[in-house]
Image (cartoon, helix red, strand yellow):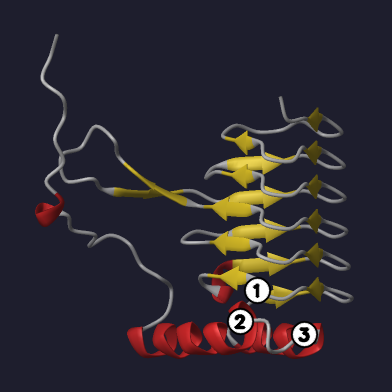
Amino acid sequence: MSEPRIRNLAAYRNPEFNPGRGRLICMIWYFLSLVVFENGWVPVSGVKVCLLRLFGARVGRGVILKPQVRIKFPWKLEIGDYCWLGQDVWIDNLDQVTLESDVCISQGAYLCTGSHDRKSPTFELRTGAIVIAHGAWLACRCIILQNVRVGRGAVVGAGRVVSQDVEDGAFFRAT
């Protein structure tokens, strides 16, 4: 049996990752996100949509953002018309996330565009985009991982972890 791979996190470097904005803008977004999005003090979607647009997100008409939605980098986010993001949705978008129109993301869902190279002792960051196609529904507490496309009209069941594409119209149910 071979030796287990030990990580040397002190040697971790991330020089090729670019958040897309400078440190000052990232810090301003971080604090605004805490106050306006994550704590639930501002229940009005319109204010949140305006802030997202101000920070570079492309957001369509009729978008509903429930309390405690977390968005890492709005400038790496596109939301189509009439999308709903439920309470405690977390869009951890180190890479581009695209939600086409009429997408419903239910409570506690997590979209994760980043991970690390498990074979590397220095744990390099790897990112990949996520696309949720027109009319798809991500049920509560599901997890969508990097480099995934959820197809048109597809449903991802509650609690599912999705690491590969979901076909148009598919029902990817919890087991």
Residues under numbered marks 1 and 3 in contact, where contact means CB atoms less than 8 Å apart:
no
- Quick one: 87 or 64, which is closer to the camera? 87
Label 2: how many Cα within 10 Å (few below 14, some 14–19, many 20+): some
Q: Which residue is mark 1?
A: 68
Amino acid carrying mark 1 in the image = Gln
Q: Quadrant of residue 108?
A: bottom right
Q: Earlier in the sequence, mark 2 or mark 1?
A: 2
Residue 43: give its label.
Answer: 3
- Cα separation, mark 1 vs mark 3, equals 9 Å
The answer to whether 75 is drawn above or below residue 89 in the figure is below
Q: Residue at horizontal 66%, vertical 44%?
A: 142
Question: Taking 165 as reference, is 100 above or below it?
Answer: below
Question: Residue drawn 61% across and 45% down?
Answer: 143
Q: Which residue is mark 2?
A: 39
Contact flag, marks 2 and 1 (Cβ < 8 Å): yes
Residue 35 percent across, percent down from the top left: 57, 89
Quarter occupied by the C terminus: top right
Look at label 2 and name its amino acid: Asn
| Left or right: 136 as drawn, with respect to 128 | right
Callout 3: helix, strand or loop?
A: loop
Q: Is residue 156 left or right of residue 116?
A: right
Q: Quadrant of the N terminus?
A: top left
The answer to which of marks 1 and 3 sits earlier in the sequence is 3
Corner quadrant of residue 118: top left
